[in-house]
Amino acid sequence: MADTITAEDPLTGEEIELPADVEVGEIVDSPATGAELEVVSVDPLVLEEAPELEEDWGE
């Protein structure tokens, strides 16, 4: 059994399980909404809604 940790989904307030080895900057999917969440801190574990990626037109 893999080690997991829990964090609060910033969109729903629900506790979600993540692998214990998540890293800052990693993108995970919210199991409740399917939205992309970004790990912004691992101690304590904090998630935020991931920013929408803007199109890079080579500028």
Image (tube, rainbow, N blue to C red):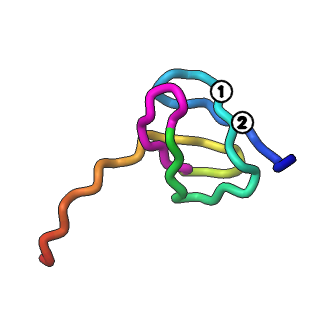
Q: Main secondary structure of the magenta part?
A: loop
| Disc 2: which residue | 6
| Disc 1: which residue | 15
Q: Given the current orientation, which residue lies at the most extreme bottom position?
A: 58
The CA distance from mark 1 to mark 2 is 6 Å
- Quarter-of-image position of residue 33: top left
* Cβ atoms under marks 1 and 2 closer than 8 Å: yes
- Range shown magenta: 30-39
The residue lying toward the viewer, choosing from 17 and 7, is 17
Residue 8 at what x, y percent from top left? Answer: 61, 30
In magenta segment, residue 3: no
Question: Type of residue at label 1?
Answer: Glu
- For label 2, the SS is strand
Residue 13 at what x, y percent from top left? Answer: 56, 22
Mark 1 surroundings: few (<14), some (14-19) or many (≥20) residues within 10 A: few
The structure residue drawn at horizontal position 60% and vertical position 22%, both measured from the top left corner, is 14
Q: Which comes before the other along the chain, label 1 or label 2?
A: 2
Please tell me whether residue 5 is drawn above or below residue 11 in the rendered image. below
The label on residue 37 is none
